[in-house]
Image (spheres, rainbow, N blue to C red):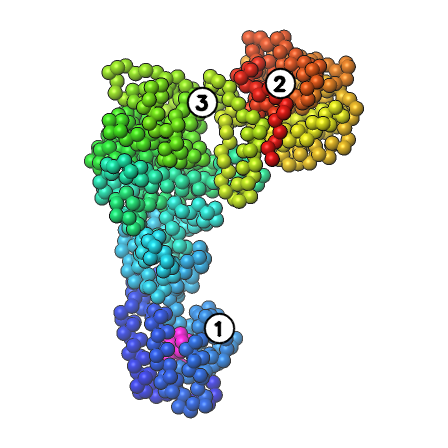
Amino acid sequence: MSGGHRPHSSNTHLRNYAAWLEDHRSSTKGLGSGSSNLDTSFVPRNDALVYIKRHAAPLITALFPDLRYAPATQDVVHNCSIGLAILLSIGKGEYIADFVQSQRLYDEHLPFLEQPYSFPRPPSKRDHFYEDFYDAQWEFCAHIFKRGHGLDLKLPKQTILPIIEKVRIDRRSTSIINRISIHEAHDELHDDQELQAGHAFGGQTYVMKTYRGKEAQAMYDTEVAAFKHIINARADENFVRFYGGFRHGTSLSIILEYANVGTLDSYFVKVRPPTKSDEIRQFWINLCNVLEGIYGLHGIPADVSLDFPATRGWHQDIKPSNILALHGSGSRACDVRFKVCDLGLSHFRLSNSYTGNPHDADVGGTREYGAPECVRPDGHSPDLNRAVGQSVDVWSFGCICLEAACWLIGDHAGLIAFRESRRHETEQKRHRHSDIRCFHDGSNLLLCVQEMINSVQQEATERDDHLTYAIVEQVKRMLVAADNRPTTHELVFDVRELLRGVSTTPRRRNTAHSSSNIDDMFSSGSSRPGRDPQFDSSSGTYGSAIEESPATSTSPSFPPIPTPRPRRHPTNRLSQVPIWSQAAAWTWYNEVKAAQRLREYPPPLPHKQHFQEMGKRDIVFLVDDVKSMAPHWKQVTETVTLLAYLLKGSDKNGMDLYFSTSPPGERPENASNSSDLARTLRARSHALQESSDISLRLAEILTECRKKMSRCPMLSPGVPAPGWPFLSRKPKPMNIYVLTDGIWREHADPFSPIDHLVQTMRNTHYEPRHIGIQFVSFGNEPEGLEKMQQLDDNDAWRDKYNPSDVVDTEPYGGNVIKMVVGGIEKTFDNNENGSVPTHSLDQPG
């Protein structure tokens, strides 16, 4: 600067400022880099702004005796108040005139990480003006915690965190948990409306989780990434609120919502169980928010067809200490919110309908509430060579629900007794594993767990607590082998209905009985205390049979966890064939597409268990592209579009589309999604031929299948023949969908290629369902329909080896389930109940 005058330090206003600054230094302490104690002085931003605003005029007068060189007071107050406070602290107040002349030096740019080009240069090179300013600025530029301003910040190591209170809550092997208070002038994580409305459950108190140990970086990265995922997916409502993470020197921390009640464990200790029905219902609604949170973390279900990859995650550490209880503005003990926390062990994978359910290496997680597939034989180290998936969270949540039901029935003392009984039984089985107090012995449910399920349901019945009984019914679905557990997608829809009072009997896989409301559970003929659906140990599900218990029995029995085994070809055990019309299927399809456009979770696939019968197999469409099919071409396109959408997850190599009039040897159209096939069909509508011999193209497809089976014969179904060198050479199963009106050339003979296929399957001992041929008929030409019916009814293809043959026929507009699996599933073959005999159903809308 020029023309200025350095004031004498004896100036009253400057001495007053120095005294004010010393007072703040002694009374206001925050957290500095590399320190775990609140021992670093800082000046709250608002205090500095208020002081400068009140004393700017006399300070400027003291700094500039010659007012011709003095900056305007309002310029200093509006733009450079903090700058003046810093300059005064290092005895350089006169340079404020240079600061107000350069916007780059205004307060909004503080702190300076590098020397600005316009920063004033002192006359002497020995004067380390910028270095002094740089060191002094941090005291006045404590970090401001702002909501939405960076979820993963890298703070300069000199930054002071304005944390004015810090109390340790927990110390873990991987982190230290502290309850903190942030100085109100630096806390912008809540707005006033949230605080007044009671939506900020912890008020202006927070939790700071600081990672430690050699895995600190990995744990921090994982948890921050997990919170980013659930926030981006708008699924964060049922997770503890995440305000952001930051790297501060060598420290890695995140700021979280403070749970003013504590964990679910502490809630069970502090709160007496509710006894009124409305309070019990509210408790279960609140606890099932945890399931909603897990559902959001798991992402769009893997069995929902997607044309784009979606992120799917899972927690693998669901336990009571990782569920937080937050009390809001209500007066009742049940007026709490339960939220999921601690995502440090979570997994995330990009997958779609082609990649199936995501899996990842076992990283440990909860032992007490862990699933059988996560057992650690040595009791400590996770098996990184073992893959686990989302179903581990379903098991853990089932364990928590059972403990919650135990608490409701027996208070905290009953819960402690249940945990002690698990500890005692698992200690007796240490030879199997060392996961003390878990719910299984490595393969089966503990006896004490089965007894607790029975006791809770019996007591709930005596108390007329229908809801708790129904929740435990859901628990039974969760505490089974991994392959047989429901997805959170299925559970959420069932539990939502249950809590609304719509349904109390879970929609179990392969079950024929259901209930429309909670009271129906106790009516005759329904699942009720003293009766339990028969358990099918081969599939881990409940069948439709109801077995009466002896008159002296007071509670239903609960079976052990079935031993997991390959489920290559699960059979359909339904006593009645379900019907899903093409009109209903199109309604579902349109709802899925609408949900995808809105980035919402799509509705679940109805009758999903039947479509799962398909497994992984090649999908082939053979379309009869002749002029007699022209009146039906729109329906042909719609049918292929719908079937391809349902089936694209089965064939990750893409589905093949053949035309009956194509030249021999012409390669089929291959596509991974239904839209591409629909475009090809629409283009083909302008090139329909006069007639076709469907048998030529069918023979070409089936001859290739026969060659592959002959090269790789089986000793018996599923068992390779001796000398078969490469297991990977086994041909994939295949489904062929033939769309035709049956009006073929006079000498067309589709019987012969199918007959040759059946003979080859018998000779090579392939499973009956290895190849399935489904004719989808169009039009009402009697001769054409009769030809296809003869193919379906050909008894020459039925024998003890293959009682269902390989051919099925279904009209366009009929039962979509039968249309998809009729060629391989004997339940649908020649079953009148499985058809919707009409050609008049069109796509809605």
Instruction: Please state which of the two labelled residues, at mark 2 or mark 3, is closer to the viewer.
Output: 2
Residue labelled with disc 1 = 115
* Residue sitting at x 46%, y 17%: 575
- In the image, which residues are magenta? 81-92
- Secondary structure mostly seen in magenta is helix
Q: Are marks 2 and 1 in contact (CB under 8 Å)?
A: no
Q: Are marks 3 and 1 in contact (CB under 8 Å)?
A: no
Instruction: Please state which of the two labelled residues, at mark 2 or mark 1, is closer to the viewer.
Output: 2
Residue 701 appears in the rendering: no
Q: Earlier in the sequence, mark 2 or mark 1?
A: 1
- The three-letter code of the residue at mark 3 reads Asn
- The three-letter code of the residue at mark 1 reads Gln
Element marked by disc 1:
loop
Q: CA distance from mark 2 to mark 3?
A: 24 Å
In the rendered image, residue 184, in percent from the top left (x then y), is placed at 33, 64
Q: CA distance from mark 2 to mark 1?
A: 80 Å
